[in-house]
Image (spheres, rainbow, N blue to C red):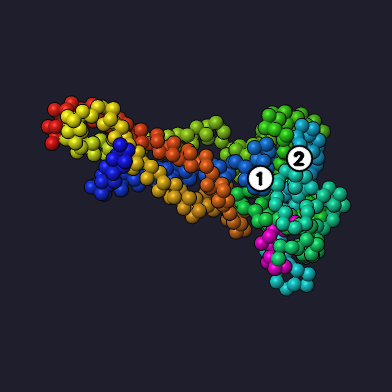
């Protein structure tokens, strides 16, 4: 029976090519827009290597300087503030601090050719919070960071540019005209992982006073660093925030004139994405509701349009429905036939929409996956590499086809139900 319905659907496609094309493209474009939003959300918020434990990581990027209730600007956190407000935390598994990416020159010793690269200054806990895939060597450890030794971890692309191979552990690289020993080589990192992204990572203590000195004004509460806090479980987030608030209150009580504000941080990955590059951002609940409203509009508009086209097509087939009922077809069988034919069109549009969505994500990846015009990818040319395994997530496929089903029911269900209940004589009069 369903083979007959499939043949009729194919015949219907050939009979009215323009209407069928509009129907398929309407479904495809709606699915494409929804899929682009879902995939972008997944890549920005869900676990993505080397930030593959985002679901139990909190972030603290900014601090505000206040004096007698007045705000005197924002900045990254100082080592003093981090050591007194965050490193003493007992609840989390690990606390790491690192600088934003900085532009430096990298070259071989004695080499004339110098290459601009992005460098991140980190502590040793950075390698515990973020899971990098090492191709050779190992990260630097706590003793090496405390000693201020000049070691570096570089990406595979940087290793090939400098040495022609990824087996570069133990070799020497000049960073900012200073010699560093390559401790390890890791797989390239996408700018999607914006807290971990860089081309070279070095100990913060290896660059001397440049990165050790805090801002001299406002009692040295701002400086050069932001913080990532790895919890044992998401259930510990509230306890970590409470403990941070207590440490912050104790820290502020030790200050004379200025106070440090953390703007309700630390944030989850979702909260950090919603806030964007600023210290404060829109309300999380309000933002989520806005996104849901946009999705609802994207769902309803094509569904209404397709419903009108389906009703028009059904009216032209009233005589066929009347003849079928004359030969004993029930309302239910007529309804199933109409829905099956429209399901075929909707699923066809769904497949096209999925293809469109992946093409759109690839072509617009820099714009969609950057947080602002000041993002690493736009300033320094970082690459928003996309993992095929992330794009081809089975759950996304499931959501897409559930959307196909919903769209089919919205666009074809009501017209099909009305047409299937037409009186036989009334339907035959349309012949």
Which range is magenta?
153-164
Q: Which of 89 and 54 is in front in this view?
A: 54
Q: Is residue 325 in sight in this rendering?
A: yes
Mark 1 or mark 2: name the one nearer the start of the chain: 1
Disc 1 element: loop
Q: How crowded is mark 2: few (under 14 residues within 10 Å), some or many (20 or more)?
A: many
Quadrant position of the C terminus in the picture: top left
Q: Is residue 275 left or right of residue 266?
A: left
Disc 2 element: strand
Q: Is residue 221 in sight in this rendering?
A: no
Q: Identify which residue is drawn at 62% across, 42% down.
A: 47
- Tell me the number on the disc at residue 116: none
Q: Nearer the viewer, residue 233 or 104?
A: 233
Q: Which of 365 and 216 is in front in this view?
A: 365
- Tell me the number on the disc at residue 51: 1
Q: In this view, does 328 lie to the left or right of 294?
A: left
Q: In this view, does 425 lie to the left or right of 211?
A: left
Residue 145 in the image: above or below residue 307: below
Q: Quadrant of residue 90?
A: top right
- Tell me the number on the disc at residue 95: 2
Q: Quadrant of residue 67?
A: top right
Q: Identify which residue is drawn at 25% across, 44% down.
A: 12
């Amino acid at each position: 029976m369903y083979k007959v319905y499939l043949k009729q659907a194919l015949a219907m496609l050939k009979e009215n090519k323009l209407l069928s094309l509009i129907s398929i493209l309407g479904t495809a474009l709606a699915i494409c827009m929804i899929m682009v939003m879902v995939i972008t959300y997944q890549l920005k918020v869900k676990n993505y290597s080397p930030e593959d434990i985002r679901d139990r990581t909190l972030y603290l990027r900014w601090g505000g300087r206040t004096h007698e209730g007045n705000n005197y600007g924002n900045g990254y956190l100082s080592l003093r503030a981090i050591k007194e407000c965050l490193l003493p935390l007992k609840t989390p598994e690990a606390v790491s601090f690192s600088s934003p990416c900085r532009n430096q020159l990298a070259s071989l010793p004695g080499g004339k050719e110098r290459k601009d690269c992005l460098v991140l200054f980190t502590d040793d806990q950075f390698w515990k919070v973020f899971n990098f895939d090492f191709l050779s060597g190992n990260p630097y450890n706590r003793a090496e960071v405390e000693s201020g030794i000049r070691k570096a971890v570089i990406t595979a692309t940087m290793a090939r540019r400098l040495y022609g191979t990824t087996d570069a552990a133990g070799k020497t690289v000049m960073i900012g005209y200073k010699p560093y020993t390559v401790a390890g080589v890791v797989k390239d990192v996408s700018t999607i992982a914006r807290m971990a992204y860089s081309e070279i990572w070095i100990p913060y203590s290896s660059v001397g006073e440049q990165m050790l000195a805090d801002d001299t004004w406002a009692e040295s509460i701002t400086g050069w660093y932001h913080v990532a806090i790895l919890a044992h479980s998401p259930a510990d987030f509230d306890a970590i925030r409470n403990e941070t608030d207590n440490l912050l209150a104790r820290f502020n009580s030790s200050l004379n004139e200025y106070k440090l504000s953390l703007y309700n941080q630390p944030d989850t990955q979702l909260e950090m994405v919603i806030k964007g590059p600023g210290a404060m951002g829109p309300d999380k609940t309000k933002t989520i509701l806005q996104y849901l409203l946009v999705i609802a509009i994207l769902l309803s508009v094509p569904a209404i349009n397709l419903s009108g086209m389906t009703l028009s097509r059904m009216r032209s087939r009233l005589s066929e429905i009347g003849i079928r009922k004359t030969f004993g077809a029930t309302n239910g069988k007529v309804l199933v036939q109409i829905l099956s034919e429209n399901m075929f069109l909707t699923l066809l549009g769904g497949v096209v929409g999925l293809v469109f969505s992946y093409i759109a994500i690839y072509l617009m990846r820099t714009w969609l996956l950057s947080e602002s015009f000041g993002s690493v990818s736009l300033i320094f040319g970082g690459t928003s590499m996309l993992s095929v395994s992330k794009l081809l997530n089975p759950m996304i496929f499931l959501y897409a086809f559930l959307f196909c089903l919903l769209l089919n029911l919205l666009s074809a269900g009501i017209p099909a139900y009305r047409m299937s209940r037409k009186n036989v004589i009334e339907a035959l009069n349309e012949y």
